[in-house]
Protein backbone atom coordinates (compact mmCIF):
# COMPACT_ATOMS: atom_id res chain seq x y z
CA UNK A 1 0.00 0.00 0.00
CA UNK A 2 1.23 3.53 -0.58
CA UNK A 3 2.90 5.65 2.02
CA UNK A 4 0.99 8.75 3.18
CA UNK A 5 1.38 11.36 0.49
CA UNK A 6 3.14 14.48 1.74
CA UNK A 7 2.89 16.53 -1.39
CA UNK A 8 4.12 13.75 -3.65
CA UNK A 9 2.89 10.54 -5.19
CA UNK A 10 6.17 8.71 -4.75
CA UNK A 11 5.21 5.30 -3.38
CA UNK A 12 7.66 2.52 -2.66
CA UNK A 13 7.04 -1.19 -2.44
CA UNK A 14 9.71 -1.55 0.21
CA UNK A 15 8.42 0.75 2.89
CA UNK A 16 11.13 0.15 5.48
CA UNK A 17 14.07 -2.21 6.08
CA UNK A 18 12.68 -5.72 6.33
CA UNK A 19 9.12 -4.70 5.45
CA UNK A 20 7.90 -5.67 2.02
CA UNK A 21 4.64 -5.47 0.13
CA UNK A 22 4.08 -8.35 -2.27
CA UNK A 23 1.84 -8.19 -5.30
CA UNK A 24 -0.05 -11.22 -6.56
CA UNK A 25 -0.37 -11.98 -10.25
CA UNK A 26 -3.51 -13.54 -11.67
CA UNK A 27 -3.21 -15.20 -15.05
CA UNK A 28 -6.23 -16.79 -16.62
CA UNK A 29 -8.05 -16.74 -13.30
CA UNK A 30 -5.28 -18.64 -11.48
CA UNK A 31 -3.10 -17.07 -8.85
CA UNK A 32 0.43 -16.97 -10.15
CA UNK A 33 1.76 -16.02 -6.78
CA UNK A 34 0.58 -15.74 -3.23
CA UNK A 35 -0.90 -13.63 -0.52
CA UNK A 36 1.52 -11.46 1.45
CA UNK A 37 1.89 -12.62 4.98
CA UNK A 38 4.15 -13.02 7.95
CA UNK A 39 6.08 -16.02 9.13
CA UNK A 40 4.58 -19.47 9.43
CA UNK A 41 6.02 -22.32 11.44
CA UNK A 42 5.27 -25.95 12.21
CA UNK A 43 4.66 -27.20 8.68
CA UNK A 44 5.58 -30.79 7.97
CA UNK A 45 7.87 -31.86 5.16
CA UNK A 46 5.93 -35.04 4.37
CA UNK A 47 2.93 -33.16 2.98
CA UNK A 48 0.53 -34.41 5.67
CA UNK A 49 -0.62 -30.85 6.35
CA UNK A 50 -1.25 -30.24 2.64
CA UNK A 51 1.88 -28.13 2.48
CA UNK A 52 5.37 -28.90 1.18
CA UNK A 53 8.33 -27.50 3.09
CA UNK A 54 10.98 -26.06 0.74
CA UNK A 55 14.45 -24.98 1.82
CA UNK A 56 15.60 -21.51 0.81
CA UNK A 57 19.38 -21.25 1.03
CA UNK A 58 22.38 -21.13 -1.27
CA UNK A 59 23.39 -24.72 -0.46
CA UNK A 60 19.94 -26.36 -0.38
CA UNK A 61 17.77 -24.19 -2.59
CA UNK A 62 14.56 -25.95 -3.61
CA UNK A 63 15.17 -29.12 -1.56
CA UNK A 64 12.16 -30.84 -0.04
CA UNK A 65 9.83 -31.21 -3.02
CA UNK A 66 9.78 -35.00 -3.17
CA UNK A 67 6.19 -35.73 -4.15
CA UNK A 68 5.30 -33.54 -7.14
CA UNK A 69 1.78 -33.70 -8.48
CA UNK A 70 -0.67 -31.65 -10.54
CA UNK A 71 -3.20 -29.19 -9.18
CA UNK A 72 -3.12 -26.49 -6.51
CA UNK A 73 -0.09 -26.77 -4.27
CA UNK A 74 1.06 -24.75 -1.28
CA UNK A 75 4.76 -24.48 -0.54
CA UNK A 76 6.17 -23.31 2.79
CA UNK A 77 9.39 -21.57 1.82
CA UNK A 78 11.74 -21.63 4.82
CA UNK A 79 14.81 -19.42 4.70
CA UNK A 80 17.50 -21.36 6.54
CA UNK A 81 20.24 -18.92 5.54
CA UNK A 82 21.49 -15.88 7.45
CA UNK A 83 20.29 -13.31 4.89
CA UNK A 84 17.05 -12.25 3.25
CA UNK A 85 16.14 -13.80 -0.10
CA UNK A 86 13.47 -13.90 -2.78
CA UNK A 87 12.32 -17.07 -4.49
CA UNK A 88 10.91 -17.86 -7.93
CA UNK A 89 9.21 -21.06 -9.06
CA UNK A 90 9.98 -21.29 -12.75
CA UNK A 91 10.47 -23.42 -15.83
CA UNK A 92 14.22 -24.08 -15.76
CA UNK A 93 14.40 -24.23 -19.55
CA UNK A 94 12.22 -21.35 -20.70
CA UNK A 95 12.38 -19.46 -17.38
CA UNK A 96 8.64 -18.82 -17.35
CA UNK A 97 7.77 -17.78 -13.80
CA UNK A 98 4.88 -19.51 -12.01
CA UNK A 99 5.20 -17.83 -8.62
CA UNK A 100 7.44 -15.63 -6.53
CA UNK A 101 7.94 -14.49 -2.97
CA UNK A 102 10.00 -11.45 -2.04
CA UNK A 103 11.79 -10.57 1.17
CA UNK A 104 11.86 -13.88 3.09
CA UNK A 105 13.78 -12.96 6.24
CA UNK A 106 16.33 -15.35 7.78
CA UNK A 107 14.72 -18.09 9.85
CA UNK A 108 11.19 -17.35 8.64
CA UNK A 109 8.74 -19.18 6.42
CA UNK A 110 6.44 -17.72 3.76
CA UNK A 111 3.75 -19.44 1.72
CA UNK A 112 3.49 -19.77 -2.03
CA UNK A 113 0.29 -21.24 -3.52
CA UNK A 114 0.20 -22.12 -7.23
CA UNK A 115 -1.67 -24.33 -9.66
CA UNK A 116 0.69 -26.62 -11.60
CA UNK A 117 0.26 -28.98 -14.53
CA UNK A 118 2.42 -31.14 -16.75
CA UNK A 119 5.91 -29.72 -17.10
CA UNK A 120 9.28 -29.14 -15.46
CA UNK A 121 9.77 -26.84 -12.49
CA UNK A 122 12.55 -25.61 -10.23
CA UNK A 123 12.92 -23.10 -7.43
CA UNK A 124 15.43 -20.30 -7.86
CA UNK A 125 16.69 -18.64 -4.68
CA UNK A 126 18.00 -15.10 -4.97
CA UNK A 127 19.85 -13.92 -1.85
CA UNK A 128 20.09 -10.18 -1.36
CA UNK A 129 23.86 -10.02 -1.74
CA UNK A 130 24.79 -13.17 -3.66
CA UNK A 131 24.26 -14.85 -7.02
CA UNK A 132 21.01 -16.63 -7.77
CA UNK A 133 20.94 -20.39 -7.26
CA UNK A 134 18.57 -22.83 -9.00
CA UNK A 135 17.51 -25.97 -7.17
CA UNK A 136 16.75 -29.46 -8.49
CA UNK A 137 14.36 -29.89 -11.40
CA UNK A 138 11.03 -31.53 -10.58
CA UNK A 139 8.81 -32.99 -13.29
CA UNK A 140 5.04 -33.39 -13.24
CA UNK A 141 3.79 -35.92 -15.78
CA UNK A 142 0.06 -35.25 -15.81
CA UNK A 143 -2.48 -32.49 -15.56
CA UNK A 144 -3.19 -29.33 -17.46
CA UNK A 145 -0.09 -27.13 -17.74
CA UNK A 146 -0.24 -24.27 -15.27
CA UNK A 147 0.08 -20.57 -16.12
CA UNK A 148 3.44 -18.90 -16.37
CA UNK A 149 4.95 -15.65 -17.56
CA UNK A 150 8.30 -15.03 -19.19
CA UNK A 151 10.39 -12.69 -17.03
CA UNK A 152 10.81 -9.08 -18.15
CA UNK A 153 14.27 -7.54 -18.23
CA UNK A 154 15.18 -3.90 -17.74
CA UNK A 155 16.28 -3.89 -21.39
CA UNK A 156 12.71 -4.87 -22.39
CA UNK A 157 11.37 -1.87 -20.50
CA UNK A 158 13.63 0.79 -21.99
CA UNK A 159 11.62 1.38 -25.23
CA UNK A 160 8.25 1.79 -23.45
CA UNK A 161 9.85 4.03 -20.83
CA UNK A 162 11.38 6.27 -23.48
CA UNK A 163 8.08 6.46 -25.36
CA UNK A 164 6.22 7.35 -22.18
CA UNK A 165 8.79 9.95 -21.23
CA UNK A 166 8.39 11.62 -24.61
CA UNK A 167 4.61 11.72 -24.12
CA UNK A 168 5.07 13.29 -20.67
CA UNK A 169 7.17 16.05 -22.25
CA UNK A 170 4.26 16.99 -24.49
CA UNK A 171 1.92 16.91 -21.53
CA UNK A 172 4.13 19.29 -19.58
CA UNK A 173 3.99 21.76 -22.48
CA UNK A 174 0.21 21.75 -22.15
CA UNK A 175 0.37 22.10 -18.35
CA UNK A 176 2.53 25.21 -18.76
CA UNK A 177 0.08 26.69 -21.28
CA UNK A 178 -2.95 26.07 -19.09
CA UNK A 179 -1.37 27.26 -15.85
CA UNK A 180 -0.19 30.43 -17.61
CA UNK A 181 -3.81 31.11 -18.58
CA UNK A 182 -4.86 30.51 -14.98
CA UNK A 183 -2.26 32.98 -13.73
CA UNK A 184 -3.44 35.56 -16.27
CA UNK A 185 -7.00 35.22 -14.96
CA UNK A 186 -5.82 35.84 -11.42
CA UNK A 187 -3.52 38.70 -12.40
CA UNK A 188 -6.47 40.32 -14.16
CA UNK A 189 -8.70 39.89 -11.12
CA UNK A 190 -11.16 37.61 -12.95
CA UNK A 191 -11.65 34.88 -10.35
CA UNK A 192 -14.73 33.47 -12.11
CA UNK A 193 -12.55 32.69 -15.13
CA UNK A 194 -9.84 31.40 -12.82
CA UNK A 195 -12.25 28.91 -11.23
CA UNK A 196 -13.21 27.78 -14.72
CA UNK A 197 -9.59 27.45 -15.90
CA UNK A 198 -8.20 25.82 -12.75
CA UNK A 199 -9.68 22.38 -13.42
CA UNK A 200 -8.38 21.83 -16.99
CA UNK A 201 -4.88 22.81 -15.87
CA UNK A 202 -5.00 20.53 -12.85
CA UNK A 203 -6.39 17.57 -14.79
CA UNK A 204 -3.68 17.90 -17.43
CA UNK A 205 -1.08 17.52 -14.71
CA UNK A 206 -2.94 14.63 -13.07
CA UNK A 207 -2.76 12.63 -16.30
CA UNK A 208 1.02 12.46 -15.93
CA UNK A 209 0.73 10.23 -12.86
CA UNK A 210 3.39 7.64 -13.66
CA UNK A 211 6.04 10.36 -13.86
CA UNK A 212 5.48 11.83 -10.38
CA UNK A 213 8.37 9.92 -8.82
CA UNK A 214 10.72 11.27 -11.50
CA UNK A 215 9.49 14.81 -10.80
CA UNK A 216 11.07 14.64 -7.35
CA UNK A 217 10.60 17.66 -5.09
CA UNK A 218 9.00 19.61 -7.95
CA UNK A 219 5.78 17.63 -7.47
CA UNK A 220 5.27 19.13 -4.01
CA UNK A 221 5.53 22.64 -5.47
CA UNK A 222 3.04 21.77 -8.20
CA UNK A 223 0.54 19.41 -6.58
CA UNK A 224 1.31 19.34 -2.86
CA UNK A 225 -1.25 19.14 -0.09
CA UNK A 226 -1.24 20.62 3.40
CA UNK A 227 -0.59 17.21 4.98
CA UNK A 228 2.16 17.50 7.59
CA UNK A 229 2.34 21.29 7.42
CA UNK A 230 2.17 22.93 10.89
CA UNK A 231 -0.34 25.60 9.85
CA UNK A 232 -2.30 23.45 7.39
CA UNK A 233 -3.86 25.35 4.52
CA UNK A 234 -2.52 28.61 5.96
CA UNK A 235 1.07 27.39 6.04
CA UNK A 236 3.58 29.40 4.01
CA UNK A 237 4.80 26.17 2.37
CA UNK A 238 1.35 25.14 1.11
CA UNK A 239 1.75 25.65 -2.65
CA UNK A 240 0.67 24.62 -6.10
CA UNK A 241 -2.69 23.68 -7.56
CA UNK A 242 -4.33 22.87 -4.24
CA UNK A 243 -3.17 26.13 -2.65
CA UNK A 244 -4.86 28.03 -5.47
CA UNK A 245 -7.90 25.77 -5.31
CA UNK A 246 -8.35 26.55 -1.62
CA UNK A 247 -8.16 30.28 -2.28
CA UNK A 248 -10.49 30.26 -5.27
CA UNK A 249 -13.23 28.37 -3.43
CA UNK A 250 -12.80 30.10 -0.07
CA UNK A 251 -13.28 33.72 -1.14
CA UNK A 252 -9.62 34.71 -1.16
CA UNK A 253 -8.85 37.88 -3.09
CA UNK A 254 -6.96 37.99 -6.37
CA UNK A 255 -4.20 39.91 -4.58
CA UNK A 256 -3.70 36.97 -2.22
CA UNK A 257 -3.53 34.46 -5.06
CA UNK A 258 -1.13 36.26 -7.40
CA UNK A 259 2.02 35.02 -5.69
CA UNK A 260 0.88 31.35 -5.49
CA UNK A 261 -0.18 31.48 -9.16
CA UNK A 262 3.19 32.91 -10.22
CA UNK A 263 4.99 30.26 -8.16
CA UNK A 264 2.93 27.52 -9.80
CA UNK A 265 3.77 28.71 -13.31
CA UNK A 266 7.44 28.95 -12.35
CA UNK A 267 7.38 25.39 -10.95
CA UNK A 268 5.73 23.76 -13.96
CA UNK A 269 7.91 25.73 -16.38
CA UNK A 270 11.05 24.61 -14.58
CA UNK A 271 9.81 21.05 -14.57
CA UNK A 272 9.12 21.17 -18.30
CA UNK A 273 12.48 22.77 -19.11
CA UNK A 274 14.43 20.17 -17.13
CA UNK A 275 12.42 17.17 -18.30
CA UNK A 276 14.61 16.43 -21.35
CA UNK A 277 17.53 15.73 -18.97
CA UNK A 278 15.45 13.61 -16.60
CA UNK A 279 15.63 9.83 -16.84
CA UNK A 280 12.75 7.71 -15.62
CA UNK A 281 13.65 4.32 -14.18
CA UNK A 282 12.33 1.78 -16.73
CA UNK A 283 12.05 -0.84 -13.99
CA UNK A 284 9.41 1.27 -12.23
CA UNK A 285 7.01 1.71 -15.15
CA UNK A 286 4.78 -1.27 -14.37
CA UNK A 287 4.63 -0.35 -10.70
CA UNK A 288 3.60 3.20 -11.56
CA UNK A 289 0.72 1.88 -13.69
CA UNK A 290 -0.58 0.24 -10.52
CA UNK A 291 0.11 3.17 -8.21
CA UNK A 292 -1.81 5.77 -10.20
CA UNK A 293 -5.18 4.21 -9.42
CA UNK A 294 -4.08 2.96 -6.02
CA UNK A 295 -3.51 6.59 -5.08
CA UNK A 296 -6.80 7.53 -6.74
CA UNK A 297 -8.68 5.18 -4.42
CA UNK A 298 -6.74 6.37 -1.38
CA UNK A 299 -6.81 10.11 -1.98
CA UNK A 300 -9.50 11.01 -4.53
CA UNK A 301 -12.32 8.64 -3.63
CA UNK A 302 -11.92 9.59 0.02
CA UNK A 303 -11.98 13.32 -0.72
CA UNK A 304 -8.67 13.88 1.05
CA UNK A 305 -7.46 16.15 -1.76
CA UNK A 306 -10.58 18.29 -2.07
CA UNK A 307 -9.85 21.90 -1.18
CA UNK A 308 -13.18 23.29 -2.30
CA UNK A 309 -13.66 22.56 -6.00
CA UNK A 310 -15.43 19.22 -5.50
CA UNK A 311 -13.51 17.83 -8.46
CA UNK A 312 -12.23 14.53 -7.07
CA UNK A 313 -14.22 12.47 -9.57
CA UNK A 314 -12.84 14.55 -12.43
CA UNK A 315 -9.36 13.88 -11.08
CA UNK A 316 -10.12 10.16 -10.88
CA UNK A 317 -11.13 10.26 -14.54
CA UNK A 318 -7.86 12.00 -15.46
CA UNK A 319 -5.96 9.38 -13.48
CA UNK A 320 -7.72 6.70 -15.49
CA UNK A 321 -6.51 8.38 -18.69
CA UNK A 322 -3.01 8.42 -17.24
CA UNK A 323 -3.19 4.71 -16.47
CA UNK A 324 -4.21 3.96 -20.05
CA UNK A 325 -1.21 5.93 -21.32
CA UNK A 326 1.19 3.77 -19.32
CA UNK A 327 -0.53 0.54 -20.33
CA UNK A 328 -0.44 1.48 -24.01
CA UNK A 329 3.37 1.54 -23.81
CA UNK A 330 3.55 -1.73 -21.88
CA UNK A 331 1.01 -3.57 -24.03
CA UNK A 332 3.56 -5.33 -26.31
CA UNK A 333 5.14 -6.91 -23.21
CA UNK A 334 1.83 -7.74 -21.54
CA UNK A 335 0.18 -9.24 -24.62
CA UNK A 336 2.30 -12.41 -24.38
CA UNK A 337 2.49 -12.56 -20.59
CA UNK A 338 -0.84 -11.51 -19.11
CA UNK A 339 -3.81 -13.69 -19.98
CA UNK A 340 -6.01 -11.31 -18.03
CA UNK A 341 -5.28 -8.38 -20.34
CA UNK A 342 -8.66 -8.53 -22.17
CA UNK A 343 -10.41 -8.53 -18.80
CA UNK A 344 -8.35 -5.56 -17.70
CA UNK A 345 -9.35 -3.68 -20.84
CA UNK A 346 -13.03 -4.38 -20.14
CA UNK A 347 -12.69 -3.13 -16.57
CA UNK A 348 -10.94 0.03 -17.76
CA UNK A 349 -13.87 0.68 -20.08
CA UNK A 350 -16.35 -0.01 -17.27
CA UNK A 351 -14.53 2.39 -14.97
CA UNK A 352 -14.55 5.05 -17.69
CA UNK A 353 -18.32 4.69 -18.21
CA UNK A 354 -18.88 4.85 -14.45
CA UNK A 355 -16.84 8.02 -14.00
CA UNK A 356 -18.22 9.67 -17.13
CA UNK A 357 -21.68 9.18 -15.64
CA UNK A 358 -20.76 11.72 -12.96
CA UNK A 359 -19.97 14.42 -15.50
CA UNK A 360 -22.55 17.03 -16.47
CA UNK A 361 -21.32 19.30 -19.24
CA UNK A 362 -18.27 21.08 -17.85
CA UNK A 363 -19.16 20.16 -14.28
CA UNK A 364 -18.76 17.07 -12.14
CA UNK A 365 -20.78 15.62 -9.28
CA UNK A 366 -19.06 16.18 -5.95
CA UNK A 367 -18.27 13.14 -3.82
CA UNK A 368 -20.65 14.29 -1.09
CA UNK A 369 -23.49 14.44 -3.60
CA UNK A 370 -23.19 10.80 -4.67
CA UNK A 371 -25.84 8.39 -3.49
CA UNK A 372 -24.69 5.42 -1.47
CA UNK A 373 -25.17 3.16 -4.49
CA UNK A 374 -23.12 5.49 -6.70
CA UNK A 375 -20.35 5.70 -4.12
CA UNK A 376 -20.21 1.93 -3.79
CA UNK A 377 -20.14 1.54 -7.57
CA UNK A 378 -17.18 3.92 -7.93
CA UNK A 379 -15.31 2.27 -5.07
CA UNK A 380 -15.95 -1.19 -6.48
CA UNK A 381 -14.93 -0.57 -10.08
CA UNK A 382 -11.73 1.29 -9.20
CA UNK A 383 -10.86 -1.14 -6.41
CA UNK A 384 -11.13 -4.01 -8.88
CA UNK A 385 -8.83 -2.19 -11.29
CA UNK A 386 -6.22 -1.68 -8.57
CA UNK A 387 -6.15 -5.44 -7.97
CA UNK A 388 -5.82 -6.21 -11.67
CA UNK A 389 -3.07 -3.64 -12.10
CA UNK A 390 -1.11 -5.32 -9.32
CA UNK A 391 -0.60 -8.11 -11.86
CA UNK A 392 0.88 -5.60 -14.31
CA UNK A 393 3.27 -4.35 -11.63
CA UNK A 394 4.46 -7.86 -10.84
CA UNK A 395 4.79 -9.02 -14.45
CA UNK A 396 6.82 -5.93 -15.34
CA UNK A 397 9.10 -6.20 -12.33
CA UNK A 398 12.55 -7.16 -13.72
CA UNK A 399 13.83 -10.38 -12.13
CA UNK A 400 17.33 -11.39 -11.31
CA UNK A 401 18.40 -14.55 -13.08
CA UNK A 402 21.18 -17.07 -12.61
Image (cartoon, rainbow, N blue to C red):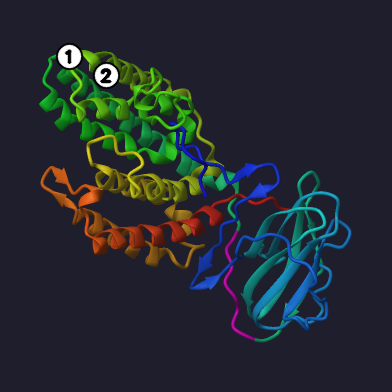
Q: Earlier in the sequence, mark 1 or mark 2?
A: 1
Q: Return the x and y of residue 42 as percentages of the image width and height.
A: 80, 71
**Quadrant assignment, res 362:** top left
- Indicate the position of residue 127 as horizontal and vertical percent values: 78, 50
Q: Mark 1 and 2 residues: CB-CB less than 8 Å, in contact?
A: yes
User: In the rendered view, does 373 fall on the left or right side of 221?
Assistant: left
Residue 360 left/right relative to 4 = left
- Residue at 49% across, 44% down: 285
Residue extending farthest to the bottom is 142
| 385 shown above or below 165 | below
x and y, in percent, of residue 59 in the image: 89, 59
Under tag 2, what secondary structure?
A: helix
Q: Which residues are magenta?
A: 143-150
Dot 1 corresponds to which residue? 187
Residue 282 image point, x, y percent: 53, 41
The residue at which mark 2 appears reads as 261
Label 1 and label 2: CA atoms lie apart by 9 Å
Farthest right residue in view? 59
- The residue drawn where x is 28% and y is 34% is 307
Quadrant of res 76: bottom right
Crowd rating for badge 1 (residues with CA inside 10 Å; few <14, some 14–19, many 20+): some
Amino acid sequence: MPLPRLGTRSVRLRTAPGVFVVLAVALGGTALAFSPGGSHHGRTADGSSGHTLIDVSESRCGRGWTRPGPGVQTFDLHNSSDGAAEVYLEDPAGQAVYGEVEGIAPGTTRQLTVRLGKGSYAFTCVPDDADAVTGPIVRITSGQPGPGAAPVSEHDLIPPALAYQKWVGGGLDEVVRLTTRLRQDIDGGDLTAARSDWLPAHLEYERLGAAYDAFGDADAAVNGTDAGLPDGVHDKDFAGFHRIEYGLWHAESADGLRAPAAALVKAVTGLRDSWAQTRMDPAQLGLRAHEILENTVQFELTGRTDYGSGSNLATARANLDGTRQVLSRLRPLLATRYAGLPGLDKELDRAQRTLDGFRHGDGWTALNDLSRAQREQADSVLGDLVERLASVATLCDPRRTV
